[in-house]
Image: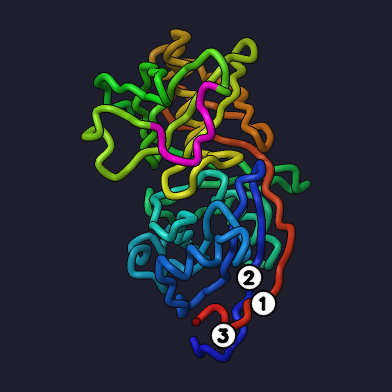
Amino acid sequence: MSSAQPVPFLKGHGTENDFVILPDPDGLLELSAGTVARLCDRRAGIGGDGLLHVVRSAAHPEAREMADDAEWFMDYRNADGSVAEMCGNGVRVFVRHLERAGLVKPGEVAVATRAGVKRTHLAEDGSGVTVSMGAAVLPGGDVTVSVGDRSWPAVHVNTGNPHAVAFVGELTHAGRLLDAPDVQPASAYPDGRNVEFVVDRGARHVAMRVHERGSGETRSCGTGACAVMVAAARRDGVDPAADGEDATYTVDVPGGRLVITERADGGIEMTGPAVIVAEGTLDPEWLHA
């Protein structure tokens, strides 16, 4: 893409997990880690917890094999520019953008991600987006999360991204969460980890804070909320695959509320809001500086 050509962007959020959105159907933008970090900078850029690069699957080398199943690929980047497999809140905002741009209609929408094709349902009335997140994997093994002089046992859950889920007495025990809490053994998370701190709010109702790898503390994390739901369910003796019954938990995040259902077949569905708040064009000289 010519450096003189203005580059369109949008800004959106899902439960205040916010994203810079770059529509690039033909995959012409070259996005280095440094460029992504500048765009996500909250003082010198647009600002966001991450970046949603919107590309047709057929135009992206990592997604071409999924093109028959999903026209659009969510090339997701963390705020520091690093690549991530999946972002649950990001998928909802991604689909909301596609619908707003007239590229898809309300109803079922498939999205290609580095964690595979995700099935979504966009409500006709715009009330929210449901994402089929796939099944959780619990690798097992003892994991410990530490902040300062406090430590807690944690549950290792992978929901497309790797998570360490710790149940604590108070959410303030998590500290500032700007830096990643210590997780041992480090070998359990060779590609980095996201860490959730969880408290109970009621029956099948929990609240969480999260440190997302590459972004620090965020207002919400979709794959993290799913990991928290699974960890809480197992702690409560609930296992839909074994019980033969779906289970639904409400997960409060600093930016709002998500509803997570684990189906008897192991699949997880997440429902929550997705909002586009602004659109404009980037100064090409700034972008390519």
* Residue drawn at 66 percent across, 61 percent down: 11
Q: Are marks 3 and 2 in contact (CB under 8 Å)?
A: no
Q: Magenta: predominant secondary structure element?
A: loop
Instruction: Identify the disc placed on residue 9.
Output: 2
Q: Secondary structure at mark 1?
A: strand
179 within the magenta span: yes
**In-image side of 62 versus 9 (left or right):** left
Instruction: Identify the disc placed on residue 281.
Output: 1
User: Rounded to the nearest whole Å, what is the CA distance between mark 2 and mark 1?
Assistant: 6 Å
Q: Position of residue 282 (x, y in %)?
A: 63, 77
**Pointer 3 residue:** 285
Q: Secondary structure at mark 3?
A: helix
* Residue drawn at 47 percent across, 29 percent down: 196
User: Rounded to the nearest whole Å, what is the CA distance between mark 3 and mark 2?
Assistant: 15 Å
Q: Are marks 2 and 1 in contact (CB under 8 Å)?
A: yes
Could you say which is closer to the camera, residue 264 or residue 162? 162
215 within the magenta span: no
Considering only order in the chain, which callout, 2 or 3, is on the residue closer to the N terminus?
2
Could you say which is closer to the camera, residue 41 or residue 201? 41
* Residue drawn at 52 percent across, 88 percent down: 3
Decide: few, some or many residues near mark 2? Use Cα within 10 Å; few <14, some 14-19, many ≥20. some
Instruction: Identify the disc placed on residue 76.
Output: none
Considering only order in the chain, which callout, 1 or 2, is on the residue closer to the N terminus?
2
Q: Secondary structure at mark 2?
A: strand
Which region is colored magenta?
173-181
Residue type (three-letter) at the residue carrying disc 3: Glu
User: Rounded to the nearest whole Å, what is the CA distance between mark 3 and mark 1?
Assistant: 12 Å
Residue type (three-letter) at the residue carrying disc 2: Phe
* Residue drawn at 70 percent across, 62 percent down: 100
Q: Position of residue 19 (x, y in %)?
A: 59, 56
Residue type (three-letter) at the residue carrying disc 1: Thr
